[in-house]
Image (tube, grey):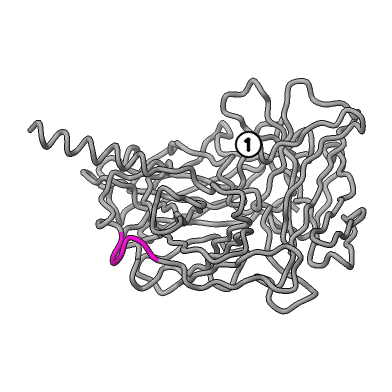
Amino acid sequence: MKHLLLFFCGNLLAIFAWAQAPDSIYGPNIKLPQLYQAGNQLGYPVLQLNGNDQLELHFDDLDGDVKNYYYTYQLCNADWSPAVVSVFDYIRGFAQTRISNYQLSSVALTRYTHYQALLPDANCVPIHSGNYLLKVFLDADTSKLAFTRRLLVLDKKISGGMQLLQPLDPDIAHTHQRLLLKLNVASVNPSNALDQIRVVILQNYRWDNALRNIKPTFYVNNVLDYNNNEDGIVFAGGSEWRWLDLQSFRFQSDRVQSVNYGKRSTEVLLRPDGDRSRQPYLFYKDYNGSWFSQTTESINPYFQTDYATVRFYFVPADRSPWPDKDLYLLSQFTGGGLNDSTRLVFNAEKGRYETSFLLKQGFYNYAYVTVDRSDPARKPSFEFTEGNHIETENTYTVLVYYRALGARADELVGVLSTSSLNTFR
C-alpha cells in the first residue's frame, strides 16, 4: 500500500507539474499563434469527437531559422485544471507530433519562419471529449514550452435552447444582456445533475469574463432550467469593437496617423483613441475582438507579409490617470489576458496611456478595459472606456460538461451558441 501510495502521488505531482496556463506565450520570438477551424480564421477551435473536421495551427518564429517544434495535447477539466488521467487514455497514437510544415518569410523587412499544421494528425488523435491545451515545444522536450492554446473536443449528447432578454433590474436594463437557458440531459441521465453537470458561458469566446458555477433554477424531468429571476445570468453589453486595418503599410487606413519607414523595420503610430463611454450606441460590423492575417500587397498572408511596431494611445476624458484603476488593451491577438504585456502606461507629459505591439499585416479588433486595483477577481470593465449598450451585437456560447460517476475527467457534451444581433433592435 505504501508503494502504491507513493506511485499515485508521484504521478499526481507529475501531472500538475505538466500544467500550464492557457493561451500563453513563453518566448519573445513566438508571435501571433493562431488555432482555428480549417479555412476560417475567425472560427473557434472546436473538434467533433471521432469526426472528420480539422483545425489549422499557425505561428511565427522571429529568430528566422529552422527549429524542431512539436505539439501535444493536455486533457483538462471544465475549470482548465489538468485532468488526473494518463495520456494514453485520451490520445490515440503518439503523444507528440513534429511540425514539419514551415516556410521562411519573403518580401518582408522582419525576418521570421512561419510554421503551420493541420490538427489532429492521424498519428495523434484526441479520443476523449473535453477541454484541451495544445502545447507547442522545442526538440521533443516538453520543458522547452513555446506557447499554449485552448481547444475543445465535443461529444454532443445533450440538447437545449437559449433566449436573450432585457434584464429585469432597471439599473442595468439598457446596458446589459440577459440569458435564459434550458438543457435536456436525458441522454446522460445524471444521478445527481447539480453536481455532475457544469455550465460555462462565454461572451465572444472570452475566458476572462466567463460565467461559471451557474446553478439551475429548476430541474424537472431531466430538464435543467436556468431562469434566474434575480438576473444572475447577465453580461455587460459593451460596444462594438474598435478596428485597425493593417492590410497595407503603404496605403494607410483611417486609424493610422503616420508610419515611419526604416531600412530594417516599420513603425505605425495610430490616432489616439478616446473615451466612448458617454457616446450613444453606434452599430457597425465587427469581429468581436478577433483578428485575421491578410494583406492587399502579396498572395500568401502567412509568410509574405511584414511586421510593424504598432503604437496605441488612449486619452482619458480629463487627460488624467485613474487613481485606482489600471488600463488594459483587450483583443484575441493579445491572448485575451490581462497582464503586464497588455497594460498601458500613463504618459503624464502627453496626458495619455500608451503601449505598443509587434503586429503582422492583417485586420484587428480591440478594446480598452479597466480593472479596479482593489478587486481580487480582476474583473475587466468597459464602463469607463467603451460604454455598455443592450443593443451591442455579441455572440454567446454555452459549454456543457458532464462528469460520470467514478470518472476522472469532465466530458464536453454540449455546445450551444446564439447572437444578440437583431434581438434588441
- Dot 1 corresponds to which residue? 339
Tag 1 secondary structure: loop
Residue 210 picture location, percent across and down: 55, 41
Q: From the viewer's perspective, is 163 left or right of 285?
A: left
Residue 337 picture location, percent across and down: 61, 42
Residue 94 part of the magenta segment:
yes
- Residue found at x 28% / y 65%: 92
Farthest residue, direction left: 1
Question: Which quadrant would the N terminus be assigned to in this image?
Answer: top left
Residue 353 part of the magenta segment:
no
Q: How many numbered dots are placed on residues in this image?
A: 1
Q: Is residue 95 above or below residue 194?
A: below
- Residue found at x 73% / y 49%: 357
> Where are the magenta residues, as a range?
91-97
Q: Is residue 393 above or below residue 324?
A: below
Residue 293 picture location, percent across and down: 69, 66
Q: From the viewer's perspective, is 378 left or right of 329?
A: left
Tell me if mark 1 has few (under 14), some (14-19) or many (20+) residues whose alpha carbon lies within 10 angstroms of its own: few
- Pick the front one: 28 or 177: 28
- Pick the front one: 222 or 187: 187
Q: Is residue 321 above or below residue 97?
A: above
Q: Is residue 195 above or below residue 205?
A: above
Q: From the viewer's perspective, is 282 left or right of 216?
A: right
Farthest residue, direction bottom: 299
Residue 72 picture location, percent across and down: 39, 58
- Residue found at x 58% / y 60%: 34
Q: For the residue marked with disc 1, what is the amino acid? A: Asn
